Image (cartoon, rainbow, N blue to C red):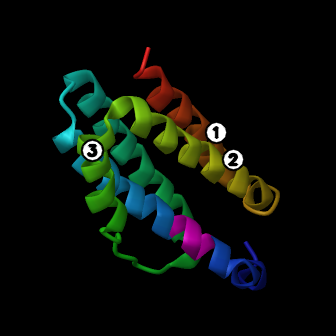
Amino acid sequence: MDQAIINQHMDELLYAQQGELDAVLMYNKLAEAVKDERDAKTFRQLAKEEGGHAQVFHQYTKQVLKPKKTKAIAVPLLYKCVGRKVLYPIIASQEYAAAKKYIALVNIFPDVESVMNDETRHGDLVNGLLK
């Protein structure tokens, strides 16, 4: 991959990498907070997959980022305040939004397509927990 192309898209790649890292921490903390073991297991799996996504972006950025704790603190608190029926659709919508943002990157960085597809699947999985 041409470094000039990577540099042209570095802000987007770093933003995506940071988002994926933040999601790892958020999903792990949410897994600790939820009451349902099936939900906890799903969130732990999503955290693992989000870590893999961060690695996809890291291969381009070559930068080591640290997850921000904001969502990891806020989302479990929201779970306790509003419950799963309100929170899970919000989380799912964020997964779908991430997938849409990745569409533009797929044409330039083809391996982002698997990340994009996973984000859509994650949204479906989180919505599916309510059924």
| Mark 2, secondary structure of its residue | helix
Q: Position of residue 111 (x, y in %)?
A: 66, 52
The residue segment tinted magenta is: 13-17
Determine the residue located farthest toward the right in the rendered image. 107
Residue at the spot 47% in from the left edge and 59% down from the top edge: 20
Q: CA distance from mark 2 to mark 1?
A: 6 Å
Residue at the spot 55% in from the left edge and 48% down from the top edge: 94
Q: Looking at the image, do the residues carrying marks 3 and 2 touch, with CB atoms under 8 Å apart? A: no
Whether residue 77 is visible, yes or no, is: yes
Q: Position of residue 100 (x, y in %)?
A: 71, 50
Q: Is residue 124 magenta?
A: no
Three-letter amino acid code of the residue under disc 2: Glu
Residue at the spot 23% in from the left edge and 42% down from the top edge: 80
Three-letter amino acid code of the residue under disc 3: Cys
Disc number for residue 81: 3
Q: Is residue 15 magenta?
A: yes
Q: Looking at the image, do the residues carrying marks 2 and 1 touch, with CB atoms under 8 Å apart? A: yes
- N-term-proximal mark, 3 vs 2: 3
Q: Position of residue 9 (x, y in %)?
A: 72, 77
